[in-house]
C-alpha cells in the first residue's frame, strides 16, 4: 500500500515538473522575442549575435516570472 502511494506521488510530481518545464519554455520564448525586439529597435544587437539578449536574460530580477519558474523547477527536481 505504501509503495503504491509513493508511486502515485512520484507520478504526480513528474507530471507537475513536466507542466512547469513546458510553462518555462513558453515564457522564455516570449521573453526572447521581447528582448530581440528591444535590441533591434535600439540597434544594440550585433548581426548573428544574441549577446544583448543573453545579458538581459542573466540580469532578470528574482521576482520576474521566468526567474520564479526556474526556481520552482529546481525545487521540484530536488
Image (cartoon, rainbow, N blue to C red):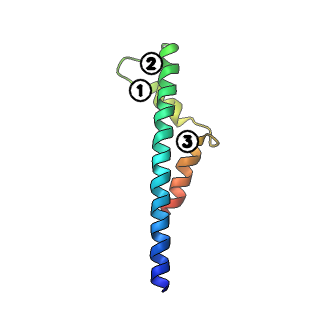
SS at mark 1 in the image:
loop
Q: Earlier in the sequence, mark 1 or mark 2?
A: 2
Q: Earlier in the sequence, mark 1 or mark 3?
A: 1
The residue tagged 3 is 66
- Between the residue at mark 1 and the residue at mark 2, the CA separation in whole angstroms equals 7 Å
Q: Nearer the viewer, residue 77 or 17?
A: 17
Residue placed at 62% from the left, 38% from the top? 61
Residue 13 location (% of width, % of height): 49, 64
- Between the residue at mark 1 and the residue at mark 3, the CA separation in whole angstroms equals 18 Å
- Asked if residue 17 is positioned above or below residue 68 in the image, the reply reads below
Dot label at residue 45: 2
Local crowd at mark 3 within 10 Å, few (<14), some, or many (≥20)?
A: many
Residue 63 location (% of width, % of height): 65, 42
Q: Residue furthest bottom?
A: 1
Dot label at residue 50: 1
- Asked if residue 4 is positioned above or below residue 13 in the image, the reply reads below
- Between the residue at mark 2 and the residue at mark 3, the CA separation in whole angstroms equals 22 Å
Amino acid at each position: 500500500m505504501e509503495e503504491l502511494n509513493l508511486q502515485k506521488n512520484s507520478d504526480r510530481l513528474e507530471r507537475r515538473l513536466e507542466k512547469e518545464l513546458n510553462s518555462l519554455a513558453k515564457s522564455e520564448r516570449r521573453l526572447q522575442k521581447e528582448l530581440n525586439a528591444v535590441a533591434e529597435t535600439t540597434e544594440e544587437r550585433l548581426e548573428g549575435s544574441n549577446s544583448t539578449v543573453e545579458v538581459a536574460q542573466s540580469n532578470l530580477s528574482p521576482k520576474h516570472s521566468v526567474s520564479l519558474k526556474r526556481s520552482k523547477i529546481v525545487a521540484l527536481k530536488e
